[in-house]
Image: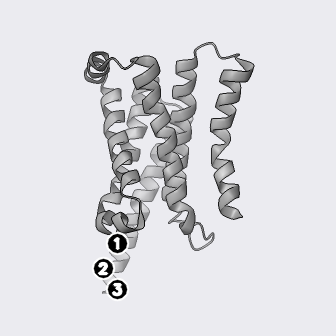
Amino acid sequence: MKRVLLFFILLIPFIFACYELFLIQNVKDPIKYIYTISGVTATVILFFSICISLIKKHYNLIKYRRMIGLYGFFYALIHFLNFLVLDAEFNIEFLIKETIDKPFIYLGMIAFLILLFMAITSTNKLYKIFKNYHKLVYLSLILITIHFIMAQKSLTIIQFFYIGVIILIGYWKLLQQIIKRNRV
């Protein structure tokens, strides 16, 4: 029951975006709107997925982390497909040129490839083999945050929040490793 509820909660941004785009049709720039909704939603969900291990003593959400992470990838995939289909119109030359000319797109592509790798290797069998590589999610979140800052061309409160969360999580993980080493 909880999994079904979580499934629908994580779908809310997608349903809302479809409602705004197709039913209300009150969006002035659909491409920018899709970038914003999908990018912010992917980032928030991915941040939440890595915070789960920090709050596992208080809330037992570890069993939902894969599902949450895959939803983060789903929104990142929408973000990428918006670029490929609507912005570049499947024009590979344009895609390559934009990626080279705009460094924030390059960083976003690297982050997306990391997330793609993690999504592909998230099955039980493959996760056991590639478990250590799944720590690349931290690198992808750093790249996503830089991508977000460069795309906006300014720092906002939410971006400072993301930076703060990355620093806190990094510090917390480092502290856990130091404590674990001292116990051995």
x then y, percent, for residue 70: 49, 51
> Which amino acid, by three-letter code, is at mark 2?
Arg
- Most extreme residue toward the bottom, as rendered? 184
Q: Which residue is mark 3?
A: 183
Check if mark 3's residue and mark 2's residue have beta carbons within 8 Å: yes
- Most extreme residue toward the top, as rendered? 28
Residue at coordinates 30% horizontally, 30% vertically from top-left? 106
Q: Quadrant of residue 28?
A: top right
The foreground one among 98 and 169 is 98
Which quadrant of the rendered structure holds the C terminus? bottom left
Tell me, yes or no, if residue 161 can be seen here.
no
**Relative to 71, residue 125 above or below:** below
Q: Quadrant of residue 123?
A: bottom left
Taking the image as shown, residue 164 lies to the left or right of residue 59, namely left
Q: Secondary structure at mark 2?
A: helix
Which quadrant of the rendered structure holds the N terminus? bottom right
Q: Which residue is mark 2?
A: 181
The foreground one among 128 and 166 is 128
Q: Which residue is mark 1?
A: 177
> Which amino acid, by three-letter code, is at mark 1?
Gln
- State the separation of the CA atoms marked 3 and 1: 10 Å
x then y, percent, for residue 91: 33, 17
Residue at coordinates 45% horizontally, 44% vertically from top-left? 163
x then y, percent, for residue 60: 61, 71
Check if mark 1's residue and mark 2's residue have beta carbons within 8 Å: yes
x then y, percent, for residue 101: 27, 18
- State the separation of the CA atoms marked 3 and 2: 5 Å
Taking the image as shown, residue 158 lies to the left or right of residue 100, namely right
Q: Secondary structure at mark 1?
A: helix
Q: Secondary structure at mark 3?
A: helix
Residue at coordinates 34% horizontally, 86% vertically from top-left? 183
